[in-house]
Image (cartoon, rainbow, N blue to C red):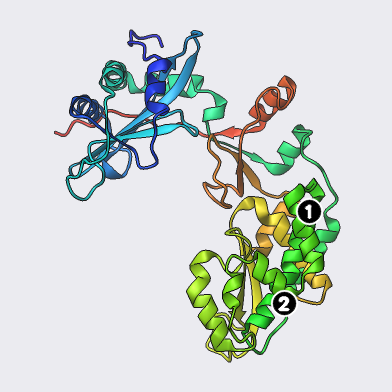
Amino acid sequence: MKRNIPEFQYVDAWKILSSNNINGNVVDDKSLEIMLRIEESMSSLEVMGDDDRRFFWIRSKDSSGRYEWLWVLTAHYKDFHYLILSDGKFKFTTLKNKDGVVGDSRKDRRYDYSDVLLSLEAHVNAVVEWICEDSDGYNKYVNRYIPYHKRNGDIPMKTLMAIDPRYECRDETHNIKTMELIKSSIPTLYDKKTLRNYISVWSAAFRILEKSKTRYGADELENKTIQDCAALDDIELFRTYDSKGEEIEGLDLDSESDFDKWYNENLVYHCMDVGYARIHLGFSSKCEGKEEDSSQYQFTIWFSVSGYWEDVMEIAIGLYNQGIILKVRNADDILEFLKKDYLVGFRPCPDKYMNRDGVKAQVFLPYIGDVTKEVYWKIIKATSWHKEPMIRPMSIKK
């Protein structure tokens, strides 16, 4: 940095980053005093979100002389104050003045970060002064020097596949045609919503799923599951591998009321999942909310985590080939994945769920070593990189 800004050493930052508890760390009185001064200093900047929050990028120097970019955030809700220090990827620690928003409890261990926070305070104060005097200069500096691995960028999947040789190009014509056929077909209908019907379709889907996993090889546990898929009947397989399969004990498999009993008591435990908490299979009304006769039922399959689209496709096509047509809630998403007609988002901490932040799926930007230097820079140039949020001083009210 061109300005005379006190160094914030990464060894000090690590004292905070390496001590994270899942619910944050309650600081002692000495540390709290400094933390509140940092919050007061950052209050000179425009509010950037709920809880009166403000944040910006800073740099810390490691033992080799290289700089690590971190961001610091301060916020408060009523009398609950917190500060977050993060590496902009996976490491972050929340420092707070008490256990939670409600009450005055400070029963947890109190952490002494006073020495580190004093160093952070000096650095933050200088950066805040810079922003207040020349916010354009600060923002230009950040956008020029922040590493690509800590930025957000979007790239068409077809473009990425043409650059990065790690992506396998396959002919998906057959799968596209079959998925379009499934999408346009009337799902198989069932007169009764029973455990027997559910177990029959669930077991067929589970066998397809487990077989599809072997395309990448199988470990000892997966081989055991494959063997069970062949050896066990539908009910035994369901009792063994559904999260609440054993709860069917004593229930009438042909009773709709017993299905409802099992469903209502076990839904929160992902009892309706072929792939636990990832691939969901359930009964739905033929009319799905329309004011028409809903005495018949169909099976609907869906997913939210982008990495499971291929498994759901395998299940849908596999059951279709067996004469069972599912309603695939994510059929359009699967077709986009098959046609590679979507945006990929490079994110420092990718979201596993689909259709977030303007892209179909999020991934890590590869490092040089994962790909060659030539491939890496081709990816960088082909990616549309987001601008960092503009940090501005608080407007002077007249």
Q: Position of residue 202 (x, y in %)?
A: 69, 71
Query: Label 1 neighbourhood size at 10 Å, few (<14), some (14-19), many (20+)?
Result: some
Element on which disc 1 rests? helix
> Looking at the figure, which quarter contains the C terminus?
top left
Q: Classify residue 164 by image quadrant.
A: top right
Tell me the kind of residue under disc 1: Asn
Q: Which mark is residue 200?
A: 2
Residue 326 seen in the figure: no
Identify whether 234 is placed above or below 287: above
The residue lying at 72 percent from left, 38 percent from top is: 159
Q: Quadrant of residue 87?
A: top left
Image: 31 above or below 241 = above
378 with respect to 305 (left or right): right
Residue 222 shows in this picture: yes
Label 2, label 1: how far apart the Cα atoms are = 22 Å
Residue 356 appears at what percent x and percent y? Answer: 53, 49
Comes first in the chain, label 2 or label 1: 2
Foreground mark, 2 or 1, reads: 1
Residue 220, horizontal then vertical, whole percent: 76, 49
Q: Amino acid at mark 2?
A: Ser
Question: Is 364 left, or right, of 90 in this rendering?
Answer: right
Picture mark count: 2
Residue depicted at x 58% and y 88%: 256
Where disc 2 sits, the SS reads helix
Given residues 269 and 61, the one toward you in this image is 269
Q: Position of residue 19 (x, y in %)?
A: 39, 30
Q: Label for residue 269?
A: none
Q: Residue at x 70, y 43 (%)?
A: 157
The residue depicted at 73 percent of the width and 51 percent of the height is: 221
Residue marked by disc 1: 223
Q: Looking at the picture, tell me which residue is in the foreground, 262 or 334.
A: 262
